[in-house]
Image: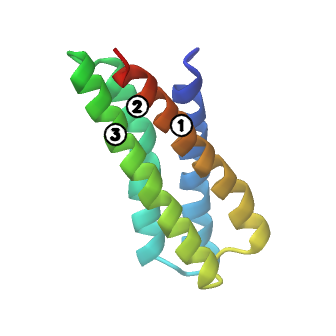
Amino acid sequence: MDNAIETKSFQFSVRVVKLCRHLKEEKKEYILSKQLLRSGTSIGANIVEAQQAQSRPDFISKLCIALKEASETNYWLRLLHATDYLSEKEFSSIHIDCKELEKLLTSIIKTTKEP
């Protein structure tokens, strides 16, 4: 993978999977972690799908879905932190990565929409 956003989103997905495993095994938290797992891994999946887009609008649409999933993931991370399932240390590192993905996706979408 030489595509920066694809690489970053894949690495983020790996972190989300490992975090959700930790939440289930160590914290016995099953509901919120399932939501986090779904949205957090969906970001990268939609970015990969965008690489195979049939048109420019299709490419933008897939990236917009990835951005929505990143925003949702951000929400679940904040909720897990606010309810003490994630420590400040656990939260801050992955939250920074999530925000970075949101910024990258926003930038790519904005640039792609320009004529």
Residue tagged 2: 47
| Whole-percent x, y for residue 39 in the image | 40, 55
| Whole-percent x, y for residue 87 in the image | 73, 75
Which numbered disc covers residue 9? 1
**In the rendered image, which quarter contains the C terminus?**
top left
Whichever of callouts 3 and 2 sits on the residue coming sooner in the sequence is 2
Check the image and report above or below for 13 versus 56.
Answer: below
In screen coordinates, is 32 left or right of 62? Answer: right
Where disc 3 sits, the SS reads helix
Circles 2, 1 touching at the beta carbon (< 8 Å): yes
Q: Residue at x 49, y 68 (%)?
A: 76
Where disc 2 sits, the SS reads helix
Check the image and report above or below for 61 versus 77.
Answer: above
Task: Determine the CA span between mark 3 and mark 2.
Answer: 9 Å
Where residue 43 sits, quadrant-wise, is top left
Residue tagged 3: 64
